[in-house]
Amino acid sequence: DIQMTQSPSALSASVGDRVTITCRASQSISIYLNWYQQKPGKAPKLLIYAASSLQSGVPSRFSGSGSGTDFTLTISSLQPEDFAAYYCQQSYSTLLTFGGGTKVEIK
Amino acid sequence: QVQLQESGPGLVKPSGTLSLTCAVSGGSINSSNWWSWVRQPPGKGLQWIGEIYHTGSTNSNPSLKSRVTMSMDKSKNQFSLKLSSVTAADTAVYYCARRRSLGLFDPWGQGTLVTVSS
């Protein structure tokens, strides 16, 4: 299995802050890395695919970067609606796996 | 646009079989996409269960493979999941989702909570 490790598991931030979440794969996955946002009681929502491509309709304050084993999701200026959990997911192998998640909370 | 909706019993007895259906609207399941199941235990992260293609081909998580059966009904534009010999550890919100090229999941169903309890 390809293990996906996210850090931090939780963070507190204020509106307007720049937030960075890291996802590390246990082996190289090229750019086969996707990011999702999940709000309480809701299904995950695709934000970024192929490491850095912004899903249609997602605000441009969200961006992704990385390749190989190390990836980041950046929110350039945190908005009230961005407080949620974020998950990375690799699609390099047939066994699809997710990171453990990062909960972004209000400071 | 494509929408997915899960349905099935919310309560299953231990050692029983969990059965869920995902109805697809706004698009055909007879298309070049994989139709997937993902679950999330309360307060925990996401686990991919498995997927089915319109040809009937399936892939599943090795940790669940011996208990998972997936099928599709093209006439009803829906696909289904059966998970046998369930225990309390299978209590989770179960989501269906379309897996597109590049391996991304989009869209997702709203999810349905299945509790395993006597």
Image (cartoon, coloured by chain):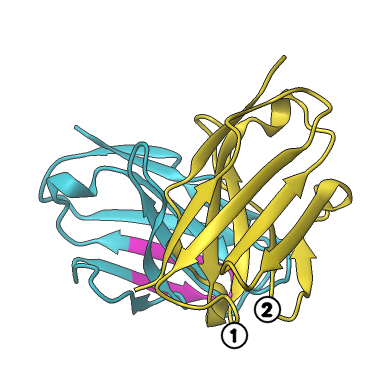
Chain colours: A cyan, B yellow
* CB under 8 Å between discs 2 and 1: yes
Give the labeled residue for mark 1.
Answer: B32
Q: Amino acid at mark 2?
A: His
| Residue sitting farthest toward the left | A16
Q: Name the chain letter of the residue that bears numbered label 2.
A: B
Residue A66 colored in magenta in the image: yes
A65 within the magenta span: yes
Secondary structure beneath label 1: loop
Badge 2 and badge 1 both on one subunit: yes
Residue closest to the far top:
B118
Residue pushed farthest front?
B75
Is the residue marked by circle 2 packed among few (<14), some (14-19), or many (20+) residues within 10 Å? some
Q: Viewer-proximal residue, B96 or A64?
A: B96
Identify the residue at the far right of this view.
B66
Image quadrant for the N terminus of chain A? Answer: bottom right
| Residue under the image location 29 percent in, 70 percent down | A63
Residue B111 x, y percent position in the rendering: 48, 45
Whole-Å distance between the Cαs marked 2 and 1?
7 Å
User: Which residues lie in the magenta part?
Assistant: A64-73
Spot occupied by residue B89 in the image (x, y as percentages of width and height): 71, 29
- Give the main secondary structure, helix, strand or loop, of the magenta stretch: strand
Residue at x 14% of width, y 57% of height: A77
Would you say residue A98 is visible in this rendering? no
- Total labels drawn: 2
The disc at residue B54 is: 2
Q: Which of B45 and B19 lies nearest the eye of the viewer? A: B19
